[in-house]
Image: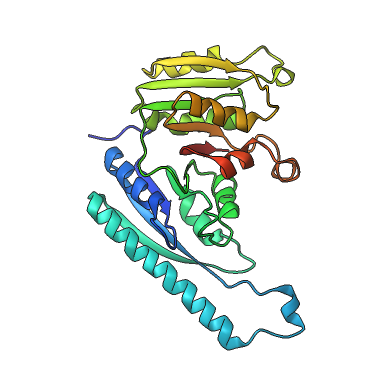
Amino acid sequence: MKKSASAISDMHVIVDLAGERRAATIAADLASRLDAHLTGLAVAFEPLIPAYSMAAPVPTDFIVAARENAIADARAAGAAFEKIAAAAGVPFETLTLESVAGEGFMGAIHDLRLADLVVVGQDNPDQPEPMRPALIESILFDAAAPTLIIPYTGVTELKTGRAIVAWDGSAPAARAVRAALPLLQFADDVLVVIVEEASKWRAGAPGADIGTHLARHGLGVEVKRVANTIGDVASSLLNFAADEAGDWMVMGAYGHSRVRELLLGGATRTVLASMTLPVLMAH
């Protein structure tokens, strides 16, 4: 029997280079539930050479050793992923890629463009990895892949029973909802939350349309509007998710240009920095 064209069948996970590798564990469990193939990507980052080193060049031996260590770390992460995936009983493969200066994440992006879903861990300040926020942004923009971000702490499994859908009527929000539909089928409750931003509602307050759309997919939906009393949409969303005991959240990523988000902050960057529950994003 063929799977639905809207199903998640081809998943990828960015494997953490160290630590508990929660994203890999959660991805393997989710792949098992979805009957999906899982590819583990371990990225070896080329060592960064400080600009001031031009006055006193870094020894070649140091650069070579740093690169070899990065590749060894990526291979070790790949081996750890294989144990996790095998224990979950899912079909899998492992890729070890090098991030070369000047190319960014193009190697990884090439492999992620056809992914139905990418799972990646939030940047962990206690065990930071090179350019993790930039990698997440590149997955969303350059690979255009739906991305499930896992908090670095507090979440050891993906509970799907109570889903929060952040809705503002935008195209990114609509793409996120479409990408999340296979996972929303696991939800017992779907709460659509609309943070009041009257200045953006030119055609009336959104809400009824998304409620009807999700109901047509057989989902039990409740639409709630919350006041933006603190003047921060992202914080209002996260506070709502906490108050409603949400298990995970769906939201569009980067409603403004990346330059504007960088300069002004923006809901996406705030959620990525302060998230306390898994968030599925799409742009």
Asked if 15 appears above or below 186 in the picture, the reply is below
Q: Quadrant location of the C terminus?
A: top right
Residue 136 visible at all:
yes
Q: Quadrant location of the N terminus?
A: top left
Q: Residue at x 29, y 35 (%)?
A: 3
Residue 154, percent from left and from top: 43, 43
Asked if 141 appears above or below 77 in the picture, the reply is above
Q: Residue at x 43, y 16 (%)?
A: 221
Residue 152, percent from left and from top: 47, 49
Counting every numbered tag in the picture gives: 0
In the picture, measured across the screen, residue 247 lies left or right of residue 128, that is left
Residue 73, percent from left and from top: 43, 70
Residue 257, percent from left and from top: 71, 40
Q: Quadrant of residue 31?
A: top left
Q: Quadrant of residue 258?
A: top right
Asked if 231 appears above or below 70 in the picture, the reply is above
Depth order, front residue of 177/263: 263
Colour mapping used in the image:
rainbow
Asked if 126 appears above or below 59 in the picture, the reply is above
Q: Residue at x 64, y 18 (%)?
A: 227
Residue 114 visible at all:
no
Q: Residue at x 28, y 38 (%)?
A: 33
Depth order, front residue of 183/241: 241
In the picture, measured across the screen, residue 19 lies left or right of residue 263, that is left
